[in-house]
Structures are given as C-alpha cells and as structure tokens.
Image: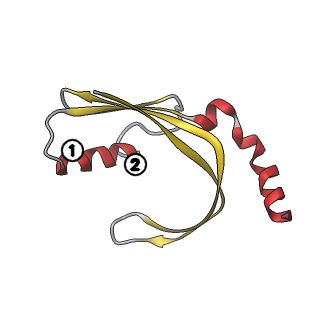
C-alpha cells in the first residue's frame, strides 16, 4: 500500500523554548503563520524496519528525526507486521520560501 500526503508548512514568527519536559521533549511558546506551501510525504509498506529519506540533506535520517521516532513508536504499539518507508520532499527547500519570511513578518507587525 502507498499513501501520499501534503503536509502544510508554516513559519515560526516567534519560537521560545521554555524548558525540557519529563518526556524529553521541549515546552514551547510559538506564534506560527501558515504559508501556501506543503511538504510532500510518501508512506509505503516495507517487509521490515523503518527507512526514511528526505531531499534535504540537513535533516537527519536516523533516530534524531521525529518522523523516525514516531514510526518506531507506532510500529511497536500497533498490531502490524512489517515495516515502513517514509520519504519527504521539502516544500520550503524547493520553493525557497525562507527568503520571504522577513517581509511577511514585517507585514504582520504593521497590520
């Protein structure tokens, strides 16, 4: 089975890390602005294990990536056999939206 999804992107206008929670994740305070760009995610069944790939080499493809950790947790908890393959194509990277973030922030502050 193959599932293709569009995951909407956003820009963090404010991102404050307030501290680390007991579960190892961080408590955040953020103001986000949605943008008309999506990451493309493809999920496929695999015989075993987890295989994650991404077109952005800056993202880790091991257990440092939240997608990989979420997949491991899901496969451990769900009554499924086999594994999964995840691929991510970054909408920000391919469309260079970051260049417009500063201008968008100025427009929001002036509104």
Using the image, tell me which numbered label, if any, was put on residue 27: none
Residue placed at 66% from the left, 42% from the top? 36
Q: Is mark 1 on a helix, strand or loop?
A: helix
Q: Which image quarter holds the C terminus?
A: bottom right
Quadrant for residue 63, please give it.
Answer: top left
Of the numbered discs 2 and 1, the one sitting upstream in the chain is 2
| Of the two numbered discs 2 and 1 in the rendering, the one whose residue sits closer to the viewer | 1
Quadrant for residue 24, please give it.
Answer: bottom left
Residue placed at 76% from the left, 41% from the top? 99
Task: Please state if 1 lies on the left or on the right of 48 as rendered.
Answer: right
Q: Mark 2 points at which residue?
A: 66
User: For the residues marked 2 and 1, what is the alpha-carbon distance in whole angstroms?
Assistant: 14 Å
Mark 1 nearby-residue class (10 Å; few <14, some 14–19, many ≥20): some
Residue placed at 63% from the left, 30% from the top? 94
Q: Position of residue 47 (x, y in %)?
A: 18, 26
Task: Please state if 78 lies on the left or on the right of 6 as rendered.
Answer: left
Q: What element carries label 2?
A: helix
Q: Mark 1 points at which residue?
A: 75
Q: Which residue ends up furthest to the right in the rendered image?
A: 110
| Front-most of residues 29 and 34 | 34
Q: Which image quarter holds the N terminus?
A: top left
Q: Are marks 2 and 1 in contact (CB under 8 Å)?
A: no
Q: Where is residue 66 in the image (x, y as percent from the top left)?
A: 40, 48
Mark 2 nearby-residue class (10 Å; few <14, some 14–19, many ≥20): few
Residue placed at 38% from the left, 44% from the top? 67
Counting every numbered tag in the picture gives 2
Q: Position of residue 30 (x, y in %)?
A: 60, 65
100 over 32 or under it: above or below:
above
Quadrant for residue 61, please give it.
Answer: top left
72 over 24 or under it: above or below:
above
């Amino acid at each position: 089975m193959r599932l293709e999804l569009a995951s909407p992107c956003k820009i963090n206008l404010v991102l404050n890390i307030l501290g680390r929670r007991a579960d190892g994740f961080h408590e955040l305070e953020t103001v986000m602005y949605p943008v008309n760009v999506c990451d493309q995610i493809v999920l496929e069944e695999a015989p075993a294990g987890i295989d994650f790939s991404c077109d952005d080499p800056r993202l880790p493809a091991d257990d440092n990536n939240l997608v990989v950790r979420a997949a491991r947790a899901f496969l451990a908890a769900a009554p499924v056999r086999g594994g999964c393959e995840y691929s991510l194509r970054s909408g920000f990277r391919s469309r260079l939206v970051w260049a417009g973030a500063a201008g968008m922030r100025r427009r929001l502050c002036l509104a």
